[in-house]
Image (cartoon, coloured by chain):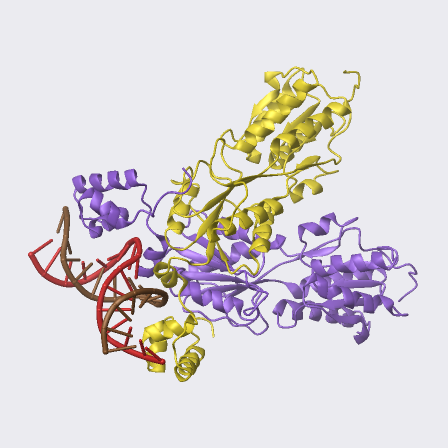
Chain colours: A purple, B yellow, C brown, D red
Amino acid sequence: MAEVGAPVTMSDVARAAGVSTATVSRVVNGRYGVSATTIAQVRSAIEQLGYESSLVATSLRRSRTHVLGLVTRTFQSYTAEVLKGVMEALRQSGFDLIIYANSDLYETYLEGWEQRHLTRLSGTLTDGCIVVTPWGEVRSSTPVVVIDPVKGSTVPSVTADNLAGATSVVEHLLGLGHRRIGFIAGRPSLAASWSREEGYRGALAEAGVPVDPVLIGRGDFNPESAAPQARALLDRADRPTAIFAASDGMALKVLAVAEELGLSVPGDLSVVGFDNIPESALAGSGLTTVDQSMYQLGYEAARMLKSIVTGEWEGRRQIVLPTSLVVRGSTGPPRSTTGA
Amino acid sequence: MAEVGAPVTMSDVARAAGVSTATVSRVVNGRYGVSATTIAQVRSAIEQLGYESSLVATSLRRSRTHVLGLVTRTFQSYTAEVLKGVMEALRQSGFDLIIYANSDLYETYLEGWEQRHLTRLSGTLTDGCIVVTPWGEVRSSTPVVVIDPVKGSTVPSVTADNLAGATSVVEHLLGLGHRRIGFIAGRPSLAASWSREEGYRGALAEAGVPVDPVLIGRGDFNPESAAPQARALLDRADRPTAIFAASDGMALKVLAVAEELGLSVPGDLSVVGFDNIPESALAGSGLTTVDQSMYQLGYEAARMLKSIVTGEWEGRRQIVLPTSLVVRGSTGPPRSTTGA
DNA sequence: CTGAAAGCGCTTACAG
DNA sequence: CTGAAAGCGCTTACAG
C-alpha cells in the first residue's frame, strides 16, 4: 500500500471517464455547464483512480492559487509559536500555507536567502508571503508581510514594541538598585535590535545613569555570539552587576558563562533576556525576560497578508504589538545595594 | 521597494541577453556546452533583472526536484521539535524542505487530509514526503516516511518505543505504591495509542494487579477529550490514586480537572503523561512523563526519506526509537501507602 | 454542454 | 555552441 505507480493525472481521469481534460477540469473546479451525467461519470472516475489535482500544475496555470507562503531560515521554538498564530488566522480562510526552508543555508545563499526563496515561490506558487526575520529588505511581485523587518524597511510588517520592552527591562533593573548594567546587542541590521538598544540607552539616560560604552557588547542574536561578549564583560574589574541580552538565546548563554565563572545568579549577577521562549522558564530559577507574543506576531501577519491579497486591507501597514515584562528568578538586587 | 511588477521569467532574461531560453536554462543549471561569452551575458542579465527560476515551473518539468515535503495537520510545540530534527538531517544534503498545511481542516477534509496533501505534492513538487501522525494508511507515487503510523501500517516509519515507555510509567507508579491506576487512551487508530495501552495492561499484569475496565477512559490525544474522562474517573467512589494519560496534552487536562475538583497533586492523585512537551516542565511542580525525542523522530525520518529517495537506504524501514521516563513533581506515593 | 488548442515557465532531446 | 520545438499537468477563452 506504500509506494504505488505513476501519479494519476487529469488525462487518466479523462480517459477513464471518456471525456476531455477540459471537462474533468470543469468538474474538479465545480464550474457550471456540465451535464449531471457527465459529472457523475467524472466523479466516479476520480474516486476510482484516487485522483487529486497537482498543486504545481494548477498553480502554474492559475493566477490565484489560494496558497500563502512563509519563508523562514530556522525552526526555533519561537517559530512554532509564529506558525500556530499564522494557522489560526488562516483557519477557514480558504488559504493554505506552504513553508519553505532551505537546507543549504550554511553555504552560498546565507545572505539573500529570504529574497531567493520569496522569488522562487512568488511568481507562481503563492499569492503572497510572510517572511520571518529577513537579512535585508525584500521585494516581490506579490504581497509580502515581514515579521521583524530590517531597520528602515518600508514593506508591510509586524513587530513587537521593542523600545517599550527594553525600557521596562532597564527600569526593572534600576528599580532593583543596579547602576552598572551591561547590554549585549543583537544583529545590527534588524530594526528590533536598534529599538532594544535604544530602549536600553534611553532608560539609563532618563534615570541619569551615564551609558558606559565598555558595558555594551555586540552579538548577533545567535546564542553563541553572546559567549565571548559575556566573558569580556564579566572579566572586567568593574564588571556590571546586571546584563541585559537582546534575546533569550543570548541571555541563556550569559547564564552559562556566569556559571562557568562561578558567579551566582542573581546574587553576583542579574540577567535579563528578550523574547520569552519556552526554555527561559526552564532555566534554573527562570530567566527574567520580555514577552513578545510570537503567536500574536504570526496571527497579525497572516491576517494582514490575507487581507492585502484579497484587497481588503484598510489599516496601517506597519503594526507594532505590545510587550510585557516577565520577572523570574534571574534578577534581584545587586550584592551591595549601596549604588545610587 | 516592496511590491514590484510582474515576476521576471526566463524569457525576460533570454530577451535581455539576446539568446534563447534554452541557453538561459543551461546557464542557470550549469550545463556544459555554453561559450564563456554567452555565460557572461546571461549571468549579467540575470543579475540585472534579479531573476530566480520558478520553483513551480521547474518542478513541473523536472522529474527530480530536490525538494522533500512534510505534511502535518497542526503546529504544536512538538512539531517544532520534529522540524528542527528534519532540518538538521537535511542540512547540506541538497534537499530543500516544503511544509504544507491546510487551513480547512475543520471542514471537509479532516479525515483524509494527509492523503490529499500528499497526492497534491507528490506528483510534481516533491521527491518524497514525511507525514506526521496521519489518520490512516497513506500511499503515494513517491517515497513516504511516516512519523507515528496507524496500527498495522506497512509504510516506512519512525516511531518511539511506546510499549517500553508506557511500561516504565506503570512500573514507576507501582513502585510508589499505587494499585488503582487509571488510564486515558489516545486515538485508537494510531499504533502509538495501542502500544501505550498495551504497556499499561502488560505492566499491571506483570505485577499481578488486575486490569479494571472502569479505570480506562477513551480519549483521542486531543487535550479536550481528556476532561470528561478524567471527571468520570475522579467522580467514582473508588477513584484511582493515579492517572496515566497517553499524551501530555491530555495529562495537563487531567491536572486541570484535579485542581477543579480540589484534589491535590500528587497527594490525592498522581498524574503521568507521555511525550514530554515543553509545557510539561512548566506545569506546577512539573508533569512526570515519558520523553520521546521528537527531534530524533524528525531527524531519523528525514535521514531515512533522503536515503530512500536517493536509493541508498539499506536498513530496516520501520524504526523504533528509545524513550525515557522523566520523573517530576506530579507523581508521589498515594495518601495511604497501605496497598500491596 | 463539450472539445481542441493555446499557454503558464521551465527543461531536454533533437537538429544544426 | 545554440535554437526551435515538444511537453510537464493543468485552465481557459474560443468554437461548435
Observer-nearest of B30 and A19: B30
User: Where's residue A315, x and y in %?
Assistant: 47, 63
Kindly give the residue lying farthest to the bottom in the view shown: B37
Count of numbered circles in the view: 0
In this view of the protein, can residue A295 be seen by the observer?
A: no
Examine the rendered structure and indicate whether residue B197 appears above or below residue A129.
above
User: Where's residue B325, x and y in %?
Assistant: 70, 35
Observer-nearest of A175 and A263: A263
- Name the side, left or right, on which A242 lies relative to A314: right
Q: Residue at x 60, y 29 (%)?
A: B196
- Name the side, left or right, on which B17 lies relative to A194: left
User: Where's residue C9, x and y in %?
Assistant: 35, 67
Q: Quadrant of the C terminus of chain B?
A: top right
Observer-nearest of C2 and A330: C2
In this view of the protein, can residue A251 be seen by the observer?
A: yes
Observer-nearest of B142 and A157: B142
Examine the rendered structure and indicate whether residue A277 appears above or below residue B196.
below
